[in-house]
Image (cartoon, grey):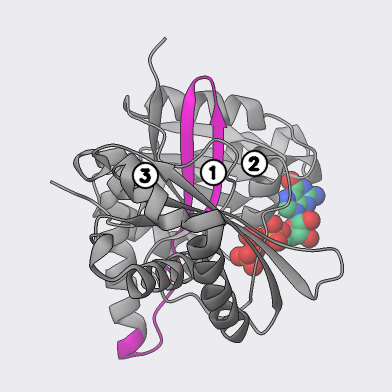
Amino acid sequence: MSHKSGFVALIGRPNVGKSTLMNHVVGRKVAIMSDKPQTTRNRIRGIFTDERGQIVFLDTPGIHKPKSKLGEHLVQTARAALEEVDLILLLVDAEEGMGPGDRFIIEHLKQVETPVFLVVNKIDRVHPDALLPLIDSYRRLYSFKEVVPISALQGNNTGTLVDLIFRELPEGPAYYPADQVTDSPEQFIVAELIREKVLFLTREEIPHSVAVVVEEMIPRQDRETVYIRATIYAERPSQKGILIGKRGAMLKEVGRLAREEIERLLGNKVYLDLWVKVKKDWRNEEAYLRRFGYGDVE
Ligand SMILES: Nc1nc2c(ncn2[C@@H]2O[C@H](COP(=O)(O)OP(=O)(O)OP(=O)(O)O)[C@@H](O)[C@H]2O)c(=O)[nH]1
């Protein structure tokens, strides 16, 4: 069977149920490390993996009516981001019906080529008879590739939504480990900090080919400690030996320096679980480059 993968942008007014949908589809609560405003263009909201492939759901902040020049700039940026994804899900609220916010978003969608699904959420809150006229009113504004009524809260029809998404996605590799459900700017920064310590401590012995991936970043029950599992990727077994060091001394030192800095960054205690793996020629593999945060590569 072919393996599919791709990036899916979730857009919609606040409160339409994006988080609820993510929690339902991705299966467990997505760990959110902070409520700082996101500055990245595309923030990963959740990752779904099964035998069919992998769906990476992205948040696209900034699609709302601009009130300032800066706002206009953000809308432009968000639109550019929508061009780069494989599919867009426009979430709307069945109970609230269409509002000016939806109309504004749809006007923008007309200017991008990416296919769009209309996902009508909260159908548990409306009578089925009310649904068709609502869908029609959206259809009059835009030619949606699919229309999928769901209840993210109750899980109605979310399986169908995932099926339809897979049908739309191109063949491709998994970009993230199967057990990873989220990513965040913090994860990227933490990976960079660890990489910096590796390069600092190993000097010329380890070339810049080393890469670090944060596989898991989960606040512990006590909320005081954050558990972080990260993998350092080397290109050759000899590099792995250097990275681990005599009786693990090098890895321990990398971990100690990185942990201190991550604790300052997050303002939490950190348990850092570091691993070293060899991945030959990762630099030549597109999927790995994406995973390591190098974005789109030619
Ligand atoms: N009845 C019903 N309520 C829902 C459904 N989906 C979401 N909700 C509720 O709607 C509210 C907003 O849901 P969220 O998932 O937080 O919405 P959101 O789009 O992620 O909001 P932002 O992250 O602020 O943009 C919550 O109270 C949810 O419980 C649904 O299918 N049915």
Q: Quadrant of residue 116?
A: top left
Q: Earlier in the sequence, mark 3 or mark 2?
A: 2
Q: Position of residue 255 (x, y in %)?
A: 55, 68
Location of residue 99 with respect to 149 vertically, above or below: below
Q: Nearer the viewer, residue 246 or 54?
A: 246
**What amino acid type should be assigned to the residue bearing mark 3?**
Tyr
Q: Earlier in the sequence, mark 2 or mark 1?
A: 2
Question: Which residues fall within the magenta stretch?
Answer: 44-70
Magenta-drawn stretch contains 55: yes
Q: Which residue is mark 3?
A: 142
Q: Position of residue 211 (x, y in %)?
A: 35, 55
Between tags 3 and 2, which lies in front? 2
Q: CA distance from mark 1 to mark 3?
A: 28 Å
Q: Earlier in the sequence, mark 1 or mark 3?
A: 1
Q: Which residue is mark 1?
A: 47
Q: Are marks 2 and 1 in contact (CB under 8 Å)?
A: yes
Q: Residue furthest top?
A: 1
